[in-house]
Image (cartoon, rainbow, N blue to C red):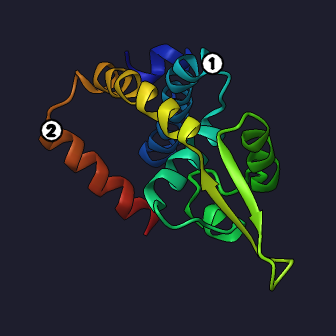
């Protein structure tokens, strides 16, 4: 559906404004789709992102700063996210004996198992969201978004 029909707005200042509003609107649409899958597992998209970051770093644990630098939403409170995931048993926080300020964070086997269960659901969600565009269009969109961010 066209942005104009979604927003019930048929005039924009210019093509740049329309494009930026379309990015914001589409980001929300994608986020809702992801949230619907994750809600069944009592996870937020930010928590899911942290778990995927930790799985990707295996076998090496990460510190909080490393996680924050790799997050999609860098405005998230990584400390709070890590603590909630720790309480769910999905990751561990180990304080370094030599340097009490250094904390290593690692995903648990329970966290790995949860991601393994989520992977096909996330892939199916992504497939449904992108079924109207070709692989070349996806690559073109990716290039344009990278170019926009400079």
Q: Residue at x 28, y 24 (%)?
A: 127
The kind of secondary structure element at disc 1 is helix
Residue nearest the observer in this picture, 61 or 23: 61
Name the outermost residue toward the bottom.
98
Q: Residue at x 47, y 62 (%)?
A: 57
Q: Is residue 117 above or below residue 46?
A: above
Q: Is residue 27 above or below residue 97?
A: above
Q: Which residue is mark 2?
A: 135
Q: Earlier in the sequence, mark 1 or mark 2?
A: 1
User: Which quadrant of the structure image shows residue 61?
Assistant: bottom right
Spatial separation of the CA atoms under disc 1 and disc 2: 29 Å
* Quarter that holds the C terminus: bottom left
Query: Could you tell me residue 123's position as x and y percent?
Result: 33, 28
Q: Is residue 78 above or below residue 28?
A: below
Q: Residue at x 41, y 60 (%)?
A: 148
Query: Could you tell me residue 51's position as x and y percent?
Result: 57, 45
Looking at the image, residue 133 sits to the left or right of residue 102; the answer is: left
User: Which quadrant of the structure image shows residue 106?
Assistant: bottom right
Q: Which residue is mark 1?
A: 39
Residue nearest the observer in this picture, 33 or 22: 33
User: Label 2 crowding class (10 Å Cα cut-off): few <14, some 14-19, many 20+?
Assistant: few
The kind of secondary structure element at disc 2 is helix
Label count reads 2
Looking at the image, residue 141 sits to the left or right of residue 17; the answer is: left
Name the outermost residue toward the front.
97
Residue nearest the observer in this picture, 71 or 41: 41
* Quarter that holds the N terminus: top left
Looking at the image, residue 21 sits to the left or right of residue 138; the answer is: right
Q: Is residue 37 above or below residue 74?
A: above
User: Label 1 crowding class (10 Å Cα cut-off): few <14, some 14-19, many 20+?
Assistant: few
């Amino acid at each position: 559906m066209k942005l104009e029909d979604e927003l019930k707005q048929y005039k924009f200042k210019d093509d740049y404004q329309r494009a930026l509003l379309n990015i914001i609107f589409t980001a929300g649409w994608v986020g809702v789709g992801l949230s619907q899958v994750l809600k069944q597992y009592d996870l937020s998209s930010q928590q899911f992102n942290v778990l995927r970051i930790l799985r990707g770093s295996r076998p090496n644990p990460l510190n909080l700063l490393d996680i924050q630098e790799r997050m999609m939403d860098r405005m998230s409170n990584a400390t709070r996210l890590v603590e909630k995931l720790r309480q769910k048993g999905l990751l561990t926080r180990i304080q370094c004996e030599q340097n009490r300020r250094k904390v290593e964070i690692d995903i648990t086997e329970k966290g790995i198992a949860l991601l393994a269960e989520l992977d096909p659901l996330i892939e199916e969600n992504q497939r449904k969201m992108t079924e109207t565009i070709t692989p070349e269009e996806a690559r073109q969109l990716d290039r344009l978004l990278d170019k926009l961010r400079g």
